[in-house]
Image (tube, grey):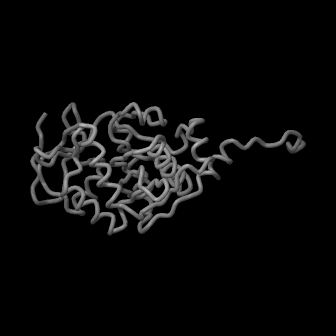
Amino acid sequence: MAIFILSRHCGFPSPELSDSDGLLAVGGDLRPERLLTAYRMGVFPWFSYDQPLLWWSPDPRLILYPNRFHWSRSLKRTIRRRVFDVTMDTAFLSVIQQCAESRLEKGRGTWITVEMIDAYCVLHGMGYAHSIEVWKKGRLVGGLYGVSLGRCFFGESMFSAETDASKVAMAELVQFARNHQFSFIDCQVRTEHLIRLGAIEIPRDRFLFELKDGLRFETLKGSWHPVDLRDAIDYLTYTPPKGNEEQT
C-alpha cells in the first residue's frame, strides 16, 4: 500500500487508502486549516520527535458513545465525595503540557511536541479545541483535551496525577456530550483503559459514516462550561417509587 506525501495543499487522500496499520500520509504541516480538514475526514496526526508528520486513519476505530460510558462504583463514590473540582477551557495550555510530560515521565514517548502544542493552542483560541481540568486543593491533577466539530469530539490525550482524576475528566466530557447530543467521542486506537470505560472498536467505514452524519450539525464553539456530575449520578441511580405507575 502506497503512503502519500502531502503537499502545501490542505487536502488528504481517502482514508480507505491507509495501510494495514492505519498510516495514510506523511508530511504537510499543522496549520489550523489542515488539522480541521484532517478531523473532518477521520484522519489525525500521530508521530514522535524524531519522525516527520504522520497522518493516520486506523481500522478499526475506537470510539465511546456517551450513553455507553461505564460509571463504576468507585467513580461514583469519588464524585459524590467531591474529591475534585472540575473546570473546562480554563487551563488548556497546562493540560496539554501535562499530557506530554506525563507520558515522558512514564518513559512512553509522546507525539505532543512543541509544534503540536502551539497548533492545538491556536485551535483552542479559534474555539475548536477544548480542555477539561481536574483540580485538587488548587493543583491540576488530571485532565484531557481534544477537538470538537459538529456533534463529534476527537479526544487527543489525557493525564492523571491522582487516582480517578482522568476518569472524572472523562465523565465530565461524557455528561457534557450527553447534554449536547454529541454522537460519539473518538478515542482513535484501542487502549485497555478506555475499553474499561466503555469504548468499543468499530470498522472504519462505519466510523466514517457516523462522522459524516455528526458533521451535519453546527459546531459548539467558544468556551465550554462544566456540568454537575452529581446530577448525572443521581439520574443514573434514581429508582421511581413503587405504586406511582399510571393506571391503564
User: In percent of the image, x 10 and y 60: which residue is there?
Assistant: 8
To which quarter of the image does residue 186 belong? Answer: top left
Q: Considering the image in quadrants, where does the N terminus appear?
A: top left
User: In percent of the image, x 87 and y 44: which residue is there?
Assistant: 244
To which quarter of the image does residue 9 belong? Answer: bottom left
Relative to 158, does residue 29 appear above or below in the rendering?
Answer: below
Q: Which of the two residues, 97 or 187, is positioned nearer the viewer here?
A: 97
To which quarter of the image does residue 89 belong? Answer: bottom left
Query: Could you tell me residue 100's position as x and y percent?
Result: 27, 49
Q: From the viewer's perspective, is 98 left or right of 162?
A: left
Relative to 129, does residue 2 appear above or below in the rendering?
Answer: above
Q: How many marks?
A: 0
Q: Which of the two residues, 238 or 86, is positioned nearer the viewer here?
A: 86
Query: Could you tell me residue 73's position as x and y percent?
Result: 60, 35
Q: Considering the image in quadrants, where does the C terminus appear?
A: top right
Q: Which of the two residues, 199 or 34, is positioned nearer the viewer here?
A: 199
Query: Could you tell me residue 185's position as x and y percent?
Result: 43, 47
Q: From the viewer's perspective, is 163 left or right of 107?
A: right
Residue at the extreme front of the image, as rendered:
137
User: In percent of the image, x 28 and y 38: which residue is there?
Assistant: 106
